[in-house]
Amino acid sequence: MVEYASIVSAVSFFVASLSGAYGSLLPSTAATARAGAVSIARSHNLSGAQAKTAYAKAPFKRPALRYLYAVGFVGSASNLAACKAAQILGPDPTSAATQSLEASPRAVATLRASHVTIAEAASAIGKGTTAGCG
């Protein structure tokens, strides 16, 4: 089965961000979530403006889910060729995100501590991935 490279990237970005300012929790305010999304975007050669726009367009109210949406967006936008190929050959991005999250004990622990279910996180990352690929 072909897995979205951008999903794996997004989950990796998310897990890597846990060693930063947020510790073992997802950002809980709009300001920190937006700043985290901008930081991840810049570290992957995307503009901060793209991350801010993705964060603003996220179809979620909670900052943690908006952050995960933006992380999914960055994962796709930073590797468009792989994302386009996965759209044709790969599974649904939400199911791929679920598999990737479940495979990371650190991500699961962080989601639990942040009161975010794997299904909510996978949905946010999957929708962000789709948006970033388009």
Image: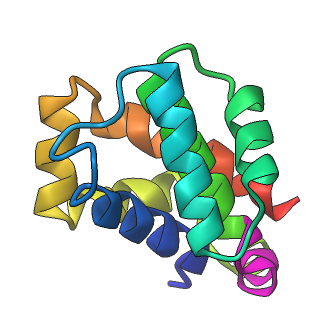
> Looking at the image, which residue is at 38% across and 57% down?
14
What's the image's color scheme?
rainbow
> Looking at the image, which residue is at 81% across and 76% down?
84
Horizontal and vertical percent position of residue 10: 50, 64
* Residue 92 versus residue 8 in the image, above or below: above
In-image side of 74 versus 16 (left or right): right
> Looking at the image, which residue is at 30% across and 40% down?
118
126 or 109, nearer to the observer:
109
Horizontal and vertical percent position of residue 58: 69, 30
* Residue 24 versus residue 17 in the image, above or below: above
In-image side of 41 versus 133 (left or right): left
In which quadrant of the rendered view does residue 115 lie? top left
Boundaries of the magenta span? 77-86
In-image side of 20 versus 33 (left or right): left
45 or 78, nearer to the observer:
45
Task: Kindly report the secondary structure that dominates the magenta region of the rendered protein.
Answer: helix
User: Seen from this angle, which residue lies furthest right?
Assistant: 134
The answer to if 117 sits in the magenta stretch is no
31 or 115, nearer to the observer:
31
User: Is residue 122 among the parts visible in the rendering?
Assistant: yes
User: Is residue 125 among the parts visible in the rendering?
Assistant: no
81 or 24, nearer to the observer:
24
In-image side of 40 versus 102 (left or right): right
Horizontal and vertical percent position of residue 4: 58, 74
> Looking at the image, which residue is at 35% across and 23% down?
28
In which quadrant of the rendered view does residue 35 lie? top right
The answer to if 81 sits in the magenta stretch is yes
Horizontal and vertical percent position of residue 49: 80, 48
* Residue 88 versus residue 19 in the image, above or below: below
**Quarter that holds the C terminus:** bottom right
